[in-house]
Amino acid sequence: MFFMMGINEGRKELNYHQMIVCNHCGAYGQYQVFMTYMVLSLFFIPCFKWNRQYFVQTTCCNTIYRLNPEIGKRIAKGENVEIRPEHLQGMERAGSRIKRCGQCGFATTEDFEYCPKCGNRF
């Protein structure tokens, strides 16, 4: 008897949009909130999630901010919360650290040349 299990990184887009004037580029845009996590899968069924982190990405210049975890949890529960500048931490440009596969959408912070999920070149 054998077990098929694995640990993967996951990403979930949360249903939240807030209109803003971007502090980074000065254009009109929206905050889009997403959550990243690690997941243990047993026979391809997600069983246990940990290391949940919440992020905000702007639609105008794709700047990514780390969101306060308490605010992120409230948004994940479906509450209508206004994101304020004090809820955001650290700023980085999309693409400078997080790589996203154009084929399958897999996101990683590692410096891979090929996508570990589908095998296509980043």
Image (spheres, rainbow, N blue to C red):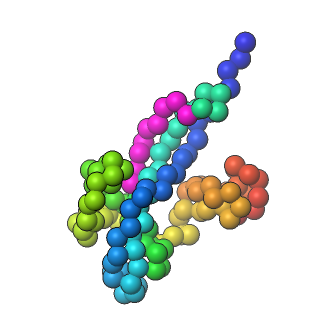
Q: Determine the residue located farthest toward the bottom in the rendered image.
A: 26
Q: Is residue 1 left or right of residue 55?
A: right
Image location of residue 67, percent across then percent down: 33, 59
Q: Is residue 39 left or right of residue 16?
A: right
Q: Is residue 82 left or right of residue 14?
A: left
Q: Is residue 9 magenta?
A: no
Up the image or down, 14 lies above or below 59; here it is above
> Can residue 91 be seen at all in this image of the molecule?
no
Up the image or down, 38 lies above or below 23; here it is above
At x 33%, y 52%, the residue is 78
> Can residue 27 be seen at all in this image of the molecule?
yes
What is the quadrant of the N terminus in the image?
Answer: top right
**Bounds of the magenta segment:** 46-54
Q: Determine the residue located farthest toward the right in the rendered image.
A: 120
- Magenta span dominant secondary structure: strand
Q: Nearer the viewer, residue 102 or 112?
A: 102
At x 28%, y 65%, the residue is 83
* Rendered image quadrant of residue 100: bottom right
Q: Nearer the viewer, residue 46 or 89?
A: 46
Image location of residue 66, percent across then percent down: 37, 60
Q: Is residue 105 left or right of residue 72?
A: right
* Rendered image quadrant of residue 79: bottom left
Image location of residue 59, percent across then percent down: 46, 75
At x 48%, y 32%, the residue is 48
* Rendered image quadrant of residue 23: bottom left
